[in-house]
Amino acid sequence: MFFKFFLSQSNFLFFGLFTAFFASYGQTFFISLFNFQIRESINLTNAEFGLIYSLATIISSIVLIWYGKLIDKIDLRIFTFFSSFGLAVSCIAMFYLDYAPYLIIFILFGLRFFGQGGLGHASQTSMARYYGKNRGKALSFGSFGQPIGEMVLPILVVLLLTLVGWQLTWLFAGFSILVIFIPLYLFLLKDHRERHKKFLESQKKKNDEKIFDRRDLFKDFKFYIYLPSYLMPPFIVTGLLFYQVHIANEKSWSLELLALSYVFYGLLSVVGLIIGGPIVDKFKTRNLIPISLLPMLLGIFLLLISDNPIIIILYMSLMSLSCGLAIPFMGSLWAELYGVLNLGSIRAMLHAIGVFSTALSPYLFGVFIDLNMGINFIFIFCLILISLSTILTYIFRNY
């Protein structure tokens, strides 16, 4: 069943995958690999860098509310070009940071806005919009690009840091978008005009259904039930990965072990996607949401109680399993609740809220660290938030 679906839609599914992969350059896990080098280059503390990072992310989330709805109005190829070109310029600008330290907030804004924001939005919205009964499978396959990036890029970065240094690594990243990704996605979307035409025709046949827009989100009680569970993966994962090197140092884990753990992080994320996609196509999504955060809960609990090196593998694996499950679960949930015609606008608002949450955790966790509250305090804080979010969706799962 999936093989037949894949063969008939392979170009578009690979567009989702490669878009998610190159969006990695604007994801926290990638940027945090250069945390020490960036701070040393412009003489910043953990909290100061966390604050600048948070401000850049908050600004990007606000602008994304406007920018993200454009995907409902302009050609997907044009939207993807603006996002990918902006991300490439931001990567290349990092090469010049030593010469212009004041650029840091603009560079971080560009990475977060065009990477995590624009390209991430293009991948998820396109996979959810153009498929109905196979939406879960499409979301899962398109999202494979993120765990592949999480597996491959940290190891590649560690190698490049040794060979060419951190500035040239960013330069290579920028040119890889211009030389590889832009020509590739234009090829993969060569038949998109016809696909979009069929989509619009199918929506006209559903004119008896209520059309939701993002203003309706804030009037719907269900939105507030599921919002905390939607926010937990980006909020917690961003905060923990942003200080991954600090956590590793506190636990006496090597940088090589940390890089290796990303292989398992990526693999288990893929497992979550493989499991989550078909499941969400068969069962009521609202009944599945309460289980999605349980692996993350267990992983952080293990991180709290042990310093054994094997724990970093288990913790990263369990946390990524939750992230993998959350992508098709949450992606399908919003489409089920609010339809797909204005999905870009709705997802832009949701994505902006999610990105805003990722702006808070690096600063908040940085304050905890600078106040010497300890990493265990951060772990307990995360466990409480996950527990409350899970209980809320379980109690109101049939609402």
Image: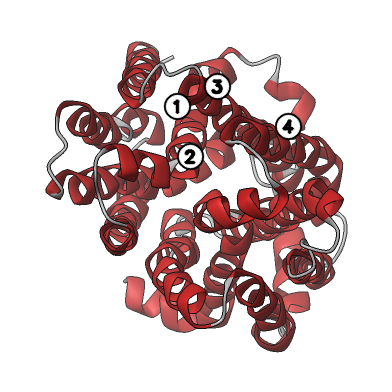
Front residue of 73/110: it is 110
Image location of residue 178, percent across then percent down: 74, 82
Instruction: Judge depth for marks 2 and 1 and give the one in front.
Output: 1
* Residue at which label 4 appears: 212
Q: Amino acid at mark 3?
A: Val
As displayed, is residue 377 above or below residue 30?
above
* Residue at which label 2 appears: 330
Q: Amino acid at mark 2?
A: Met
Tell me the crowding category of disc 4: few under 14, some 14 to 19, or many 20 or more residues within 10 angstroms, Cα based: some
Q: Alpha carbon of mark 3 to alpha carbon of mark 1: how far?
A: 24 Å
Tell me the crowding category of disc 1: few under 14, some 14 to 19, or many 20 or more residues within 10 angstroms, Cα based: many
Mark with earlier residue (3, 1):
1
* Residue at which label 3 appears: 367
Tell me the crowding category of disc 2: few under 14, some 14 to 19, or many 20 or more residues within 10 angstroms, Cα based: many
Q: Amino acid at mark 4?
A: Phe
Instruction: Judge depth for marks 3 and 2 and give the one in front.
Output: 3
